Image (cartoon, grey):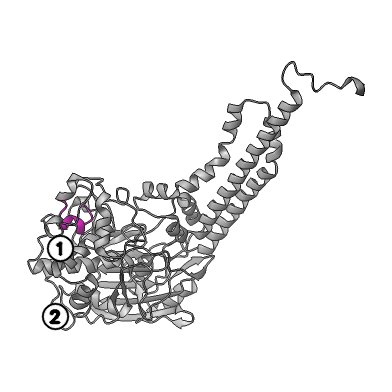
Amino acid sequence: MTTFSDCYHSRSRPRVVLTSIAVLVCLLAMAVPSPPAHADAGYTVDDYLAKVVDSGVPGIAVSVMRDNEVAQTSAAGEAEDDRPMTADTPLRIESLSKSFTAMAVMQLEEHDKIDLDKQVRTYLPEFTIDDPRGGGITVRQLLNQTSGMTDATAPNLYDGGITTLKQSVAHLKTATLAADPGAAFNYHNPNYHVLARMVEVISGEQFDYYLSQHVFKPLNMTSTKDTQQSTDRVPAMARGHSIVYGKAFDSDGSGYFSEGSGGVVSTANDMSKWLQMQSSGGRTPDGTRLVSQEAIDLMHTPGSKASNGYGFGWYNAESAEGPPVRISHSGAGAGFGAYQGIFTESGDSIVVMINSGTGITSPDPGVLAQNLLHDLNPEIPALQAFSNGVWTDLILTGLGLITVALAVVGLVRARRWGQRRAGRSKIWTILRLIPPLIPIAWVLALPSLQLLLTGRTAPYSLLFHVSPVALIWFFTWAIVCGALVAVRIVSYVRSERLDSTSTGPKGDDSSAPAESCR
């Protein structure tokens, strides 16, 4: 699963977007534009990577290919604790893992062990959901994300009790469909959990073992591993980070099951072999054939109009930021980001891997990739990227301080508010308590709003990595407003009691002076 591999998704990047500040971010991006990309094709890859690291990215590794030959593989920055990033440093590739799962399925298809247009239950009877249409889901529909399953209609995708593919499939028994199978595209990580489990059952091998023996080993991807949990580590792996105020902080994120959809850990050198095979009709550098040219073409081709440009673990479309059309996929997690792209018109291919995760102040690996290619080949258009993370966090902090200060002023005046409301309409008093409850409701609704607006599930633990500053602001604001409402209610109740005591009930002369005190 991605992470947050993808907690959010666009054609260029599975991205977790904090819904409550989307408008604000757009305004900031317009108000503080990023510098234009360098058009000087004389810039070397190393020059470009140095500038990326200077901008705040802790570490980056890339491999650039031209006409299916490796032009340069390089790295810059730190992997962890002053250990330099290299082209052989393992990093999580998040949702790029889906293309590996699709490869495993296509290998079995070419050995006549899978028919793409047969129902999944033909091969995996254990796959059941709480919707009668579920029996009609085909293997092809899982591959191109048109099964009808969605984050909104699935049980909690971040259940910490899931540790195996079998458990992940069983977890879907209460899921329903948002659309008929094949009718609509919905990016949904469990589609690829089911596919990975199907590979296990049909091959008789654990999924990680299958990939190691039938994909990684033939490609000589000696540093590439498959993992089960989003926080699993392999030897020499880089440390993940979040970027706050332009500084990188260790952050591997919260753990959840990701095998099949986002579990692969790889290196820039290994990924160059993977991309070369993709552009060589399914053959490895030594001539070994993993799959046929027809299978490669099928994986790279959108399945239908309903598939939204998605093939099998690959997009064939423009990025969200603009042209040209490319065959690509991106991945974004709490601490890592990655991108793989094959630009067929120019003959360029590229993989970019960074050890900072998704977030409104973190770089988009897809944008970094295309701008690097632009520097090397000006025919590829540059992309404008929002890269003012420090200013974004500072502005969000300022807004947070202002709103909290206003709430604190209201808190100080809360006692007098209750005194002024004593004796007045109770209904109107209750209505006057609603405005400070809005921030509380907003914070409580954030995960639901995220799901409603993006179609992707993201609990608070993942939203925190999108913008820690914004989430801290919202929670602080909600807490202060909650205290404000509590003090107002207590003050009002006390004032009502005092008013009732001082006035006394009709006919009661207890408040009159005693005869002896006259």
**In the image, what residue occupies the spot 14% across and 70% down?**
203
State the quadrant of the C terminus. top right
**In the image, what residue occupies the spot 26% across and 45% down?**
178
State the quadrant of the N terminus. bottom left
**In the image, what residue occupies the spot 36% across and 53% down?**
457
Say which amino acid is labelled 1. Answer: Leu
Q: Quadrant of residue 497?
A: top right
Disc 1: which residue: 298
Q: Establish if 387 lies above or below 456.
A: below
Horizontal side of 113 relative to 20 (left or right) equals left
Q: Which mark is residue 288?
A: 2
Front-most of 88 and 371? 88
Give the distance between the C-alpha atoms of the residues marked 2 and 1, in whole angstroms: 19 Å
Q: Establish if 155 lies above or below 216.
A: above
Q: Establish if 16 lies above or below 209.
A: above
- Is residue 315 visible in this depiction of the protein? no
Q: Quick one: label 2 or label 1, which is nearer the N terminus?
A: 2
Horizontal side of 103 relative to 447 (left or right) equals left
Q: Where does residue 190 sit, x and y in percent of width and height?
A: 27, 58
